[in-house]
Image (spheres, grey):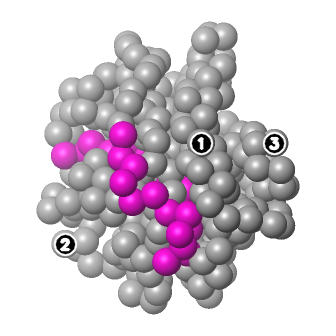
């Protein structure tokens, strides 16, 4: 278990060196930065994007000689409020955005009022790619996806699944599973991945799709059960956990992508950087520069032609009263 607990910081070290090298090259060309840098995270503290941002911020600050302030700018389904604030910021390298599959790719596809697309932003660094994991509360009498589906069919509407919010990747994954398996489950949208995980651990919901690196420590502690991962192949971090493909859902192949982007036209963007590498099951990359192309290719089969949600319209994406304020 110790090797996993250091996996995320260790993996981030590689991308951090390359990312800071890029910033230092930019710094050498002009007086940058001349004030604190703001790194906007469009979700509450505790979720995967926030965790990654905080791991990066201290090292960035030490290298650049200016504070890097992580600002959790929540609100708007799928992180729209935070994304729009960065899209409208001055393109001077002092405002960056910790984007994700949900906020940069999915939200503008689903919400017509998003006001941006993945191509709006200047890409700076593709930070990480990780499979998602389907986790189950240990009180649920199922140990495989097939057993979960049989249970859900025997108790229509009795099971609930959490998500990081309406229109996020975990929400689409849950809706895809419902549709493909012909089962009824209740969607409970939380305000961010951290709160969704807390809800699952506390038994408020029975299942959750979330990043493997967020779920796996709790699986190894015996507090959650891992049913499947959403990658095309099994993860080296959890080799005994089957894929959703192996579990009978060959279209449920998803990737959670985290990127750092800047306002449109920002010279800090690095359009030539797309150097994939891999280690231990989450891929960390220098650059990204074409998040749109990368995201459309790798982020989620749910955003490809097989996305049943888009074919069914917006009905599954209507927020409950619990999440209504996020759509204001």
Residue 76 point in image, percent of width and height = 59, 77
* The label number, if any, that marks residue 62 in the structure image: 3
From the image, tell me which residue sits under label 1.
21
Image: 236 above or below 174? above
Q: Position of residue 261 (x, y in %)?
A: 53, 62
- Residue 121 highlighted magenta (yes or no): no
Identify the secondary structure beneath mark 3: helix
In front: mark 2 or mark 1? 1
Q: Is residue 65 above or below residue 3?
A: below
Q: Is residue 259 magenta?
A: yes
Residue 160 percent location from the top left of the image: 50, 51
Q: Are marks 3 and 1 in contact (CB under 8 Å)?
A: no
Q: Which residue of the protein is positioned furthest toward the front in this rendering?
A: 29
Residue at left offset 19%, top offset 72%: 311
Q: Residue at coordinates 44% horizontally, 39% vertically from top-left?
A: 285
Distance of label 2 from label 3 (alpha carbons)? 48 Å
Quarter occupied by residue 175: bottom left
């Amino acid at each position: 278990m110790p090797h996993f607990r250091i996996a995320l910081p260790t993996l981030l070290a590689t991308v951090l060196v390359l990312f800071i090298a890029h910033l230092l090259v930019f710094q050498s060309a002009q007086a940058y930065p001349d004030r604190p840098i703001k790194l906007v995270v469009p979700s509450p503290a505790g979720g995967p994007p926030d965790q990654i941002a905080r791991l990066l911020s201290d090292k960035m600050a030490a290298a650049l000689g200016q504070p890097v302030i992580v600002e959790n700018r929540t609100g708007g389904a799928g992180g729209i409020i935070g994304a729009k604030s960065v899209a409208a910021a001055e393109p001077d390298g002092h405002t960056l955005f910790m984007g994700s599959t949900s906020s940069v790719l999915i939200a503008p596809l689903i919400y017509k009022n998003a006001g941006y697309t993945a191509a709006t932003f200047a890409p700076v660094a593709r930070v990480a790619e990780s499979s998602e994991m389907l986790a189950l509360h240990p009180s649920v009498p199922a140990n495989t996806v097939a057993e979960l589906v049989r249970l859900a069919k025997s108790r229509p509407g009795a099971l609930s699944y959490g998500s990081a919010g309406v229109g996020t990747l975990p929400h689409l994954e849950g809706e895809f599973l419902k549709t493909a398996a012909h089962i009824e489950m209740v969607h409970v949208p939380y305000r961010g991945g951290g709160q969704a995980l807390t809800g699952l651990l506390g038994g408020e919901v029975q299942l959750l799709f979330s990043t493997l690196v967020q779920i796996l420590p709790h699986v190894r502690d015996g507090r959650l059960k891992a049913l499947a991962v959403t990658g095309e192949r099994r993860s080296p971090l959890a080799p005994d956990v089957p894929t959703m493909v192996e579990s009978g859902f060959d279209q449920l192949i998803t990737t959670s992508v985290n990127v750092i982007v800047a306002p449109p036209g920002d010279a800090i963007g690095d359009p030539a950087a797309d150097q994939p590498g891999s280690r231990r099951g989450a891929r960390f990359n220098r650059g990204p520069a074409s998040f749109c192309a990368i995201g459309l290719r790798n982020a989620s089969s749910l955003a490809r032609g097989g996305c049943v949600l888009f074919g069914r319209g917006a009905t599954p994406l209507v927020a409950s009263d619990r999440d209504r304020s996020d759509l204001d």
